Image (spheres, rainbow, N blue to C red):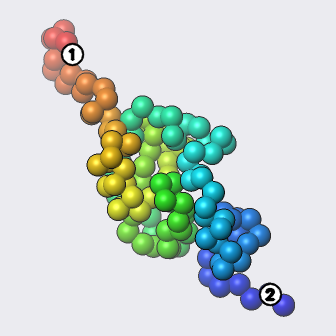
Amino acid sequence: MRVEWYGQAAFRRAHGDVTPQEAPRAAAAPPRWHDARMPSFADARWYEVRPAANRKPATYRCPFCDELLPALSAHMLVVPEDDRGGRRHAHTACVMAAREAGRLPLRDEVEPPRPGLLARLLGRD
C-alpha cells in the first residue's frame, strides 16, 4: 500500500512519477512558462498582477522559479493580456524580482491609458 502525503498528487502531476528526493533533478528542467504548450504567458506584451484571494486548498507551481506554492499561502496572480485562462499563480518575491528585472511589464507601462468617459463623450483624444 502506498501512503501519499498531502499535495503529493499535485507534485506527481507536475513532475511526473518522481519522488520528492528526485525533485531537484526534475526542477532543473526549464521553467514551465517557457514550455511550448503555454506560449501565450511568456509572449504576452503586458501583464495584470494582483494579490491572489483564493481560499481553495490547492497547490500551484510558480511560473518563474518552477517551485511549488504551498496551499493557502499568500501569493500573486499574474494574468497575461486579459487572458483569464492563461493566468498563473506565483510567489510574491518572484513577481517582484521579475518586475525589477523588467520581465513583467504592466499594461500602463506598455499601452497609454484610455481617455476617461467625459473626454470620449466630448471627442477629446
Provide residue 7's location: percent of width, then percent of height.
62, 76
Q: Which of labels 1 and 2 is toward the front?
A: 2
- Which quadrant would the C terminus be assigned to in this image? top left
- 87 over 52 or under it: above or below: above
Q: Secondary structure at mark 2?
A: loop
- Is 4 placed above or below 93 here? below
Seen from the viewer's position, the closer of residues 84 and 74 is 74
Name the quarter where the N terminus is drawn.
bottom right
Residue at numbered disc 1: 120
Q: Earlier in the sequence, mark 1 or mark 2?
A: 2
> Going by the image, does 124 lie left or right of 21?
left
Visible residue check, residue 85:
yes
The amino acid sitting under disc 1 is: Arg
- Near mark 2 (Cα within 10 A), the count class, few <14, some 14-19 or many ≥20, is few
Q: Is residue 38 above or below residue 62?
A: above
Closer-to-camera residue (123/79): 79
The residue drawn where x is 16% and y is 11% is 124
Q: Which residue is mark 2?
A: 2
Q: Residue 115, image x and y in percent? A: 21, 22
In terms of secondary structure, where does tag 1 sit? Answer: helix
